[in-house]
Image: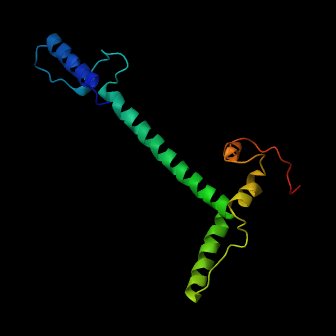
Amino acid sequence: LDSREYHHQIRLSRDLFYNATDHTHNFRYSQVQHLIPHVPVPAETTAISFAFMICLSVGLAVSFLAGFHMYLIMTGQTTIEFHGNRAKKSQCEDRGEVYCNPYDLGIKRNVEQIWGTWPGEGWFWFWLVLLPSWRNNEFL
């Protein structure tokens, strides 16, 4: 938005304005015309910047939420259990004890509980989490 073409378009519009008028009026940025293709005018840059900031904010929020839920999956917790376990861990630390989540089976087994087992070795399973599950429901 702050490129050489952007400023050149403003200069061209200003020159066209002063050549077409008697110089008694002042040039305003709202009078910039589309003279160079694919270069926004100042009135459009506000909307573009606003849309970018909204998309960036939502993208960061969703990324943090996805990261937090991946942590919960890897530690075998729900959101409510996370808060309860945090309080229990604090109480145990005050007594000098170590708290262990009874549902934490290790990263691999916790992930298997959510997405099922996968064939083969390696990190191929990570891409499988993006696909729908092919296993039958265990709770029905």
Tell which of 43 and 129 is nearer to you.
129
Q: Residue at x 38, y 19 (%)?
A: 38
Image-quadrant location for residue 21: top left
Is 27 displayed left or right of 105 in the figure?
left
Image-quadrant location for residue 85: bottom right
Position in image of residue 57 (x %, y %): 46, 46
Is 39 displayed left or right of 122 in the figure?
left
Tell which of 104 and 66 is nearer to you.
104
Placement of 97 over or under 25, stated as above or below: below
Position in image of residue 117 (x %, y %): 78, 51
Placement of 17 over or under 3, stated as above or below: above
Q: Is the N terminus in the top left, top right, bottom left or bottom right quadrant?
A: top left
Q: Is the C terminus in the top left, top right, bottom left or bottom right quadrant?
A: bottom right
Position in image of residue 60 (x %, y %): 49, 48
Placement of 125 over or under 69, stated as above or below: above
Q: Residue at x 34, y 22 (%)?
A: 39
Q: Residue at x 28, y 27 (%)?
A: 3
Q: Residue at x 17, y 15 (%)?
A: 15
